[in-house]
Every structure is written in structure tokens, then in C-alpha cells.
Amino acid sequence: MASSAAIHVAVIGAGIVGAAAAHFLAAAGARVTLLDASGPAAGATGASDGAVSVASKRPGPMMDLARHARAFYVRCERDGLFRGLFHRRSTFLVARTAVEAELVARHGADLAAAGERVVEVDRATLLARIPGLGASVCAALEIPDDGHALGYEITQRLLGRSRIAIRRNAPAAEIVMRAGRAAGVAIGDELVAADAVLVAAGIGSAPLLGLGEILIPRKGQMAVTDRASPSGPAIDGHLMAASYLAAKRGIAREDGHIGLVIDPLMTGQFLIGGSREDHRSDHATDARTIAAILREALDLYPPLAHRRVLRSFAGVRTASRDGLPIVGAHPRREGIVIATGFEGDGICLGPFMGACAARLLLGEAPAVDLKALSPQRFLRVEAHA
Amino acid sequence: MTEAPILIVGGGPAGASAAATLAEAGLPVLLVEQRDQLGGAIHRQPANGAGNHVWRPARHRRNWAALTARLRACAGMIEIRTQTVFLGVDGEGRFLFDDRRAGRVFASRPRAAIVAVGAVETIRPFPGWELPGVMTAGGAQVLLKETGRPPEGPILIAGSGPLLPALAAQLARAGNPPVAVLERGRPWRRPATLARLALAGGPMGEAAAYAAALALARVPYRGGAVVTRAEPDGAGLTVGMRIGADERVLRVRHLLIHDGIEPNRVGIPLPAPEAAVPVLLAGDGREALGADAALLDGRRAALQLLARLGAGAAELAGLESRLERARRVQAALAQALRSEPVEPAPETLICRCEGRSYADLQALDGDASAREIRLMGRFGLGACQGRFCGPMIAALRGRPVPAASPPRWPLRPVSVAALARLSTDETE
Ligand SMILES: Cc1cc2nc3c(=O)[nH]c(=O)nc-3n(C[C@H](O)[C@H](O)[C@H](O)COP(=O)(O)OP(=O)(O)OC[C@H]3O[C@@H](n4cnc5c(N)ncnc54)[C@H](O)[C@@H]3O)c2cc1C
Ligand SMILES: Cc1cc2nc3c(=O)[nH]c(=O)nc-3n(C[C@H](O)[C@H](O)[C@H](O)COP(=O)(O)OP(=O)(O)OC[C@H]3O[C@@H](n4cnc5c(N)ncnc54)[C@H](O)[C@@H]3O)c2cc1C
């Protein structure tokens, strides 16, 4: 492999993951060509919420990774890269039934076991913190160290700071292999030659790598309201219903496809979501789903009745079959690194995972052990199937 | 099951004309209008139910009286829902409406739709256009029509287009003529175009009547004149202007600005005349050709739809040629008033909802997509969703900002509570 100072990497996908990888590659002296089928943040990164949240993560490798990833945000905010874009704020996990309370308590125990600060909040305290909360809320946990960042703002900052020129409207059709290793990327008739290729193309990674059986598009619909406060978050924390946890922990429920979050944005607006619709990769929103989300939201936080919906939107999460991201070297094709499958967690994980992918491309060991995310695991599954 | 109605959105001349034509052909119609009365931009009625006394050419009043009589004659076929805002079409083909009276959103699946939502006013931004005391000329005209009273204190009208002298004449008739009308273009320098316009009849007679009223009230009408900035000044404004090569300053109470109109397309479904549920556009919302053409265009859309639904249609060719004439008049008018774009100062506000300036727009990459302009630039993310700043941005960048696809709903802000109470006509 060429020395890291000379290596030329083609990064496919200018979402938060590709932008972060490109940024840290360039910072390490690599030459970077960043390609996107459309433009920066054109995928899930520009159509999502921005919870940088450990509170919501499944126990196990995801919870641990999210702690690293959130710490990475805190560092980047402190050293100036993310200054003004990452905001610390609490997550409240709220339960509205006894069953939900049990789930929340179990999740809180898992968080504490992973080393996370968890504070039990009774209804009265919670009401003082978030006046107007719905009558059905019976139990809550506060996770005080979480935060928020908008994916498209982080993407823009990462690209702006490293002055990486992005090639828009450049859909990669194929990764060209020569003598058993990646030689570049084909865009139409053009070959963009490169020493190594990072595939960070979200759901677009599936056709590029033949991962159609492994990656599932999961649409999420959300609604944005007008401002409840002239600036700054309208309430003192991010409300995450137990239904969201259930969705994340893989627990099926009847009203299954809605995992409710009410997110107070820095603009004073609320972002309310969201649905989880498997095998849907379109960006349409429908009134039935949005109305159902709003009914849930009104039950949890009735003062929303005074707000107006400004717009609805949908984004497409990229889920892997086993629910974990896919980050690591391609098991069979040398010179290709994969970073996709971040489902509903890529804003939180993205910058850190992009930095890890950059190190892999430079032939260095990533900051944490990524074995659980290795693409290798699907080879094994395939062999046993 | 009763036959699903044909939906008509917008109760202006185009929508009302389409509704009457379809109902006369025996088809049930649902006519939806966001205001509390039909009439559209030109026949706006006072809020209290009194008559609209703002001076308008008699031809418009006669046309509207004839149209409302036709609507009354087939009232049995037309369900009119006022105070009902069309919110767009969702991803599953539901047409969505905000019934503001009931405080509830309802969805329906019409047999076909004609969307006639009119035009939006455009302006050319300058520092201070967002200040209190500055209003669009169209907005001021609506106020005049709804209250019957002109604003008090000195008024300056500036921008470009035929609305400027029309509004000035109406204000003069109502008792407060503006101190001046500043027209950006220099119509007098294009005599050939003016001559062609003079031969066009109808609209020009209107212009002559307005001109006479302005002369009578001694309102100066200056060509090649632009506002360069406005600053707060006590209860009023100090307005800087350039007239030819002269810079001048004027103190006024109100500054009314206007630079033409454009079809209102934000969130509006794309025309699809051949789809299973055909969607047609009509009136100024399809092509801004003015009030007379809107009547014809509503009828044209209705006849086209009748043909598509197999109910036969004649007369289309005649309508098309009259529309073509209106198109030529508008083109000549635009030609006569054409002026070079002026680059605004960097601090000039572009997106009022989100407080974004021209400098913010320039900070975006030259090849930034519509999505980047929205997300990274925060342009058009606010209450108007780009309806107002979209045309400005397009003019400043010299190319249209592509619409979101699929078109986004709600196309107007809608109460969370109302949307949560969604009702549909579906059997689920
Ligand atoms: C509704 C919703 C809410 C969410 N909320 C949160 C949250 O609160 N917290 C959180 O952490 N995460 C959240 N997420 C998840 C997060 O948005 C994603 O995990 C993250 O954005 C993924 O980033 P990415 O860079 O991997 O992919 P994307 O952002 O999808 O980027 C992929 C890019 O690749 C490009 N591309 C695709 N194919 C090609 C090709 N062949 N050639 C060139 N370019 C190509 C695309 O144009 C796109 O720009 C949410 C997601 C959704 C949909
Ligand atoms: C500011 C202004 C001033 C004008 N002055 C003159 C003039 O002096 N002389 C002249 O000849 N012409 C004038 N015109 C043009 C004339 O008003 C139009 O050509 C004519 O009214 C167009 O008719 P229309 O039916 O296409 O649209 P409109 O008359 O604009 O009617 C559209 C209707 O749709 C309704 N609507 C819009 N959106 C929705 C929604 N989402 N849901 C429900 N209802 C909705 C509106 O309330 C309105 O009633 C002016 C236009 C404007 C905008």
C-alpha cells in the first residue's frame, strides 16, 4: 500500500459517515475524492432527527459504541470542530403504563451497568421540569449526559473545515477491481482511480456491494412544528417514549411501527417522530401515519395542541439484518472499506465511525475494537445457512 | 355509493368558472376556498359582509356577478366549503384539507381535481423591506378591500407592474393618494411595445382609467426608479431611492412594494391530466395571465376534464386562442417593464421566516441543490415554506429552485390538534 501521505481514497457517499471519514482522511494527509449521487446530506443525514443519545441504545456493543461516539462529539465540540453544533441535553425515558415502566426500569439498569449516569425522576419532579406533561406519564428516567446535533450541519462543518471538494450528481455505478484490489470507482463511463475505496453510501451501499439480502431500508416519517420559544429548546429535555425503546430493543407491539420521540430543537421548534416502516425506501409521508404520531405525541405532551405543523418529511434508515452497523474491511475485496447500516443511530455514531473508517483505510487500528461490526460476520452466517 | 365529486381548490375567478362549467355539465363538484367567501384576489369582499367598494373596472364586477349567478343556478351540484385550506396530497393519494371551522383535518379521494390557487406576489429585496410599515402592494390592496379604508399617512408605492398604478388609483379614490409611484422599468423607452399594448383593448382601457385617476390626484409616476433601502424613522420610514442617476430620500408612513406575480406552486400537486385521478391546474396558479384570462382558463380546465372523463367538449380551440391573446399582452407588458436585475447588499434579508440574508445565500456553493438551500441555508424552512422567498432566490441565482419531489404537505401550517383529529372518507 502507498504511504498514508500519498494514498488517494475515493469516498462514496457524502452523508455524515462519508463526510467524517473524508474529513479525517484529509486531516491525516490523504488525498480524498468525495462522491455523492446527489449532494451532501442528501440521504438519511438530511432527513432525520439528531439525537446523540446513549439512552436509546440496545444493550451490548451498540450502547458501548454510542458512549464512545458521544464522547467523540464532546471532544470535537471542545476542540472547535463541532463548536456551536453539538448541544448537551437530557433524554427522558418516559413510561405511560405499568408494562412500559418495567421496560424503562430494565433499560435503566442496562444503562447503569454500561457506566451511564441514570437518574430516577418521579412524576412531580418531572412535571416541574417539563410543565404540561400528559396525565398518563407514570415513570421516567433521566439520562443527563446525552446531546443533540443536526446531521446536515455536522456534515457541512466537516466538509467546510477540511475544504474537501465534493463531486455532486456523481452516482458510483461500480467499484472497479484490478489484480484483486480496488482500483477506483466507475461513474458512468468515467473511472475515478483510487488506491482505496470507502463505501459509506447508506442504503445505496446495497447495490454497490451486493448486500441486498443484508441491508433493509426502513422509512421514518416525522413532523416539524413552528416555534414554541423564540430561540433555544422549548422544553428541558428530549422526550423518548417507551414505545421507542421497545422498537429499538426489538420488542413487537400492536401499534408497532411508531416509536415516539418529541425533540425540542435549538430553534424552539419541535421535531416529532417517527415511524419505522421496513422495506420502504421512498420519501413520501402519509396523513394517517403523521396523524397517528401526533396523537401519541399529544397524549405524552398535550401542550403540543397549541403548535402548528410546518412540514412533514421522511428519511430512509439503513438497517442490517442483525441490527448492528457494518464497519470494516470488505472480507473478500482488498482495498474496500464499508461503513453503513447505522439504522436510526448514524447521527450519534457517524462522526466517530467515520474517524474509525479513516484509520482503517490508512492501515491503522481504530480507536476501539470494531469486531462486532465486521462485515465478516455475514460471511459466516452465509456459510452456515 | 354516490359519485365522488370533482374537487376544485380555490374560489377565485378560475376555480368558480371551472365549478360552474362542471356543474352545468351535470357533475358533482366540491369547491374548497380558504377564505370565508369566494372571489379570489380580485373580488375580495370585506370581512363584515358589507360590499366591496374599492374601485374596480365595471367589466370585472359584471363578470363576477354573472359567474356567481351561474353558481347559484346549479347550487344543488356544488358543495362549497369555505374556511377550508387545501393542504396538498399525501403519499397515498389522499387530498388533505384543514377545516378551520371544525378544527379538523379531513382527507378525501376525489374523482379528479382542478387546482386554481392563484398567484403569489414577488418582490425584489432591498435592506429594510421586512420592516413594519413595509407591505406588499397586493397585501395592502386586500386590506383596502376588506376594510374599505386606505392606510393613514404618506404612502409610497414602488416596484414594477400594472398593479402599481392600479393600487395608486384605488388609494386615491379611497381618499389617500400615494406621494409617488416608482416603477423600476422604463415603459416610455419602449414605445413600440406600448403601442402594441394600446391595441390590446380591455386591460389597456383599465390602465388608461387608472392613469387618468393618477393625473387627477397629481400622483407622480416615475420610470427607472427603485427603492434602495428603508430605515425605521419614528412611526414611519426613511426610504432611500434612485431615480435615474439621482439618489433621494423620502419620509413616509407606508412603503408598498410589488414586483409582479408568479403561479403559486409550493406544495401544489404536479399537473397530471391523464392520471387515474386527473389533476389540472387553472388560472393564475397555472400561468399568471390576469383576471379575464383566469375566467377562460377555469373553463378550459373544466372542458378538458370533461373530455378526459368522456363527457365531450367543444369550444376548446376558441378558448385557447383567447388565452394566447392574453399571453401576448402579458409578454408585451413584461417586455415594456423589463429591467436589469440589481444585486442586493449582502445584509439584505431574503428569507423572512428564518431571518436569512443574501450573504447567507451567497455562502452556499454555486451548485447547491434545492435541498441544500433549504437545509444548509435554512431558506424556506419557515412558515411560508418558500412560497415567498423561493421566487426571490430563483431570481437572484438566475435559475429556478426545483420544487421538492414529491411535493410536500402540509402546504400551509396546520394545527397539531387538527391534524391529529384526521378523518377520512375511507372504509378501513
Ligand atoms: C426519520 C429518521 C430519524 C433519525 N433520527 C436519528 C437520531 O435521532 N439520532 C441518530 O443518531 N440517528 C438518527 N437517524 C439515523 C441517521 O440519520 C442515519 O443513520 C445516518 O444519517 C446515516 O448516515 P450515512 O452517512 O451512513 O448515510 P446517508 O446519510 O444515507 O448518506 C448516504 C449518501 O450516499 C449517497 N449515495 C448512495 N448511493 C450512492 C452511489 N451509488 N454513489 C454515490 N453516492 C451514493 C447518497 O446520496 C447519500 O448522500 C434517523 C434516521 C431517520 C430516517
Ligand atoms: C396582489 C394582486 C393584485 C392584482 N390586481 C389585479 C388588478 O388590479 N386587475 C386585474 O385584472 N388583475 C389583478 N390581479 C390578478 C387577478 O387577481 C388574477 O388574475 C385573478 O384573480 C386570478 O384568478 P384565479 O382564480 O386564478 O386566482 P385567485 O383570484 O388568486 O384565486 C385563488 C383562490 O384560491 C384560494 N386559495 C389559495 N390557496 C388555497 C389553499 N391552499 N386552499 C384553499 N384555497 C386556496 C385563494 O384564497 C383565492 O380565493 C391581481 C393579483 C394579485 C395577486
Image: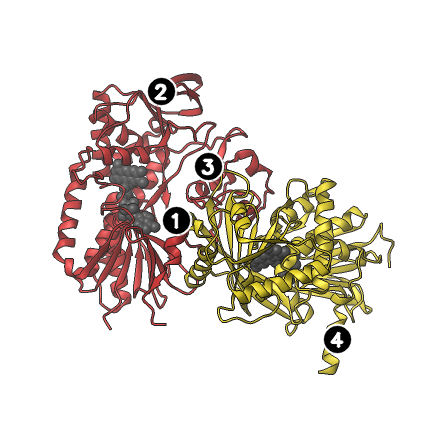
Chain colours: A yellow, B red
Some atom of ligand 1 lies within 8 Å of the CB belonging to the residue at label 4: no
Dot label at residue B352: 3
Q: Are marks 1 and 4 in contact (CB under 8 Å)?
A: no
- In what element is the residue under mark 2? strand
The residue that appears at 36% across and 25% down in the rendered structure is: B223
Some atom of ligand 2 lies within 8 Å of the CB belonging to the residue at label 1: yes
Asked whether the viewer can see residue A353, the reply is: yes
Residue A300 located left or right of residue A364: left
Q: Are marks 1 and 2 in contact (CB under 8 Å)?
A: no
The residue that appears at 22% across and 34% down in the rendered structure is: B206
Q: Amino acid at mark 4?
A: Leu
Badge 1 sits on which subunit? B
Q: Nearer the viewer, mark 1 or mark 2?
A: 1
Counting labels gives: 4
Residue behind mark 1: B412
- In what element is the residue under mark 1? loop
Q: Residues within 10 Å of mark 1 (few under 14, many from 20)?
A: many
Dot label at residue A379: 4
Q: Residue B188: percent from the left, percent from the top?
A: 33, 26
Q: Are marks 2 and 3 in contact (CB under 8 Å)?
A: no
Residue behind mark 2: B252
Vertical placement of residue A251 versus A123, above or below:
below
Badge 2 sits on which subunit? B
